[in-house]
Image (cartoon, rainbow, N blue to C red):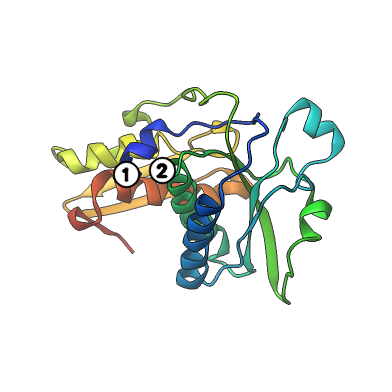
Amino acid sequence: MDMREAMFLRHTVRKYIAKTIPQEVVTALDGRIRQNNEAYHLNMQLMTENTDAFNAVLKIVLAKGVHNYIIRAGPDTEALCEKVGYAGADIMLYAQTLGLNTWWVGGTFSRKGVEKHIALLDGQKLLGVLVVGYGQTQGTPHKSKRAEDISAYQGGAPAWFARGVEAVLLAPTALNKQAFTIQGNGNQVMMACDNGAFSGVDLGIGKYHFELGAGKENFTWAE
């Protein structure tokens, strides 16, 4: 399975079975996390066989069987949210290629429980976790907007633009709002997201998906 195939197959999964992730899979996933940390100057960390990301109530009601997760954090700069969204999307889809299921968690997690396991340096911020593991199911597609609800292209839209928009609509977003605006003109694309406190992270996830669907070689991001 490649990353594009993973994008279509990945769905949010909140309940997991008690199956340990093999060491070779942990090693591969850890390597991908390190690559993204180095590329985007982030502080993300994989936790295995650990349940501290959720409190007792959430473990019963929402996050059953969660024993593995990736802490998402980095320097508290203006660009942090978008970087974490973009890098996290890469890790999320890579996990799918390894046969893992995922759940992007922005708010419903135990901050105190997670902070016990990561050394946040001065000026760093914790933005949430990405649950990984073997799901009870493979999840189901989320309710989605139509391409015309979030995008417009000046003139006849090329196939790569349509593929990019389709990919964005596959991306997880906070509260499933899909609050994107995508505009294309020639090989220039402008993308924005208006989802309140989650806008930056959602924009980073959306941009990664658009690039994967459209192909980076076909367009450039407008300044």
Q: Amino acid at mark 1?
A: Asp
Q: Are marks 2 and 1 in contact (CB under 8 Å)?
A: yes
Query: Residue 8's quadrant in the figure?
Result: top left
- For the residue pair 205 and 54, the one nearer the viewer reads as 54
Q: Neighbour class for label 2 at 10 Å: few (<14), some, many (≥20)?
A: some
Q: Position of residue 205 (x, y in %)?
A: 46, 48
Q: Which residue is mark 1?
A: 2
User: Seen in the image, is 171 located left or right of residue 113?
Assistant: left
- For the residue pair 23 and 181, the one nearer the viewer reads as 23
Q: Neighbour class for label 1 at 10 Å: few (<14), some, many (≥20)?
A: few
Which element carries disc 2, helix, strand or loop?
A: helix
Farthest residue to the bottom: give it.
122
Q: Amino acid at mark 2?
A: Thr
Q: Position of residue 49 (x, y in %)?
A: 71, 47
Which element carries disc 1, helix, strand or loop?
A: loop
Q: Please name the residue shown 32% across and 37% down the image.
A: 5
- For the residue pair 152 and 126, the one nearer the viewer reads as 126
Q: Position of residue 124 (x, y in %)?
A: 68, 70
Quarter of the picture holding the N terminus: top left
Q: Please name the residue shown 50% across and 38% down the image.
A: 172
Quarter of the picture holding the C terminus: bottom left
User: Seen in the image, is 61 located left or right of residue 46?
Assistant: right
